[in-house]
Image: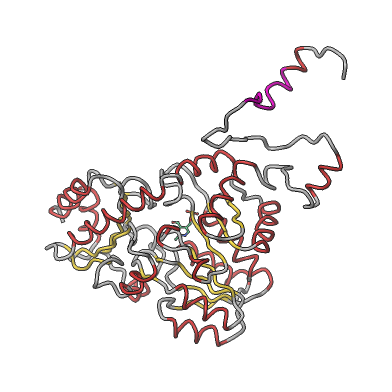
Amino acid sequence: MGRELRPGTRVVRSARALPPGEGTPVAPPLVQSVAFDYRSAAGQDGVFGGDRSGYVYGRYGTPTTAALEAALADLEGTAAAICFTSGMAAIAAFVDACAISTGGRVVAQEDSYGQTRALFERWVRERGAKITFVDATDVAAVERALAEAPTALLYVEAIATPLLRVTDIAALAKAAHARGAKLAVDATFATPLLVRPASLGADVVIQSLTKYINGHGDVMGGSVAGNADVAKAMRDRTILDGAYLPPHEAWLCIRGMRTLDLRVRKQCENAARVATHLVGHAKVARVRYPGLASHPQHELAKRQFGGLFGGMVTFDLKAANKDAAFRFLDSLELTASATTMGDLWSEVLYPAISSHRRVAPEERARLGITDGTLRLSVGIEDAEDLIADLDNALTRV
Ligand SMILES: Cc1ncc(COP(=O)(O)O)c(C=O)c1O
């Protein structure tokens, strides 16, 4: 400009960029900037038009969120990943774009995460969506459902809550593809450490980043990983629907993700110890853990999860009533009674009052959830302390 700027102008424009210097940061830069300044209108035009890579506005992509997206795509083994403000935002964006918005039929796992199922049921009620719910652990039942009518999407979870049922991703991918449908797998409970669904034929992998990937209970986020077409469709969703993961959340998530391997391995080890301890406990009727030989999909879990069985353990109290469950929950000292999972610390969920509160008692019974069913997300604490905490609470039941 050639003219000396006055302080009022200088402060407004101050510290836009970090001073250059040798050395690459080992932690990623947190770029909070919502907008990006262009020296060249033609360059800006090229980025808006998709001919050049770059950033234009917070909903279109931010460098820090993009760093997380690249890391997730690498982890999932997909061409790309797009991040959303929550797991539910990711699920809603993908399933709507892939099937519901164009009238495509969906075959969905009947015991999907409660809010996923509630969302799908709302779409059936409000938008006339064609969604058929099936037992996704029964491949023949899925094949029959797929054969009933043309289907755009088969939607399943790698490990479903709260009974920790395991789906056969390779077999389901084959079944979906044989009918021209895509397979989407919500792998939140399994994490990319147990399984990378894309390597088994899944077209899309969904994660609630809120859980194991971040793992520190301080971020909500979700991701959709898939090919370039999926990424393009999801980018369109973040731009128009607006649920794009902001940079600070992405930064925290990258930080959390760096210890995913350590955390999940320890959680699996602790969960196996807790599950083995609870089997045969005088106050416990049944233990569900994919690592136990008694688990209905134990052989599949062994084959599919590479020797890990996850950090979740579900068990039924012999006293299958609310009073007993409340006494148990109120007596826990270390384990948090909290409606989430996958964090560093142990957490317990009581489905009858939380995730399955709105599910009719007959349907709950059909699914195998009693008033004594409790779901534990095992943390990285010392296993002995955790077991002592559970034992102490069980004595009060
Ligand atoms: C398997 C599964 N998928 C998706 C979600 C939704 O994720 P979020 O809570 O980040 O919206 C959850 C939440 O508990 C979940 O358990």
On the image, the x and y values in percent for residue 199 come to: 50, 67
Colour scheme: secondary structure
On the image, the x and y values in percent for residue 84 come to: 58, 51
Q: Is residue 20 magenta?
A: yes
Q: Answer with left or right where residue 268 lies relative to residue 218.
A: left
Q: Is residue 209 magenta?
A: no
On the image, the x and y values in percent for residue 265 come to: 33, 53
Does 203 appear above or below 234?
A: below
| Residue at the image position 45 percent from the left and 50 percent from the top | 213
Does 200 appear above or below 59?
A: below
Instruction: State the quadrant of the C terminus.
Output: bottom left
| Prevailing SS of the magenta stretch | loop
Residue 320 placement: quadrant: bottom left
On the image, the x and y values in percent for residue 39 come to: 82, 34
Residue placed most toward the observer, 49 or 59? 49
Q: Residue furthest front?
A: 22
Does 106 appear above or below 383?
A: below
Residue placed most toward the observer, 153 or 352? 153
User: The magenta stretch spans which residues?
Assistant: 11-21
Q: Answer with left or right where residue 302 lies relative to residue 47.
A: left
Instruction: State the quadrant of the N terminus.
Output: top right
Q: Answer with left or right where residue 17 lies relative to residue 349.
A: right
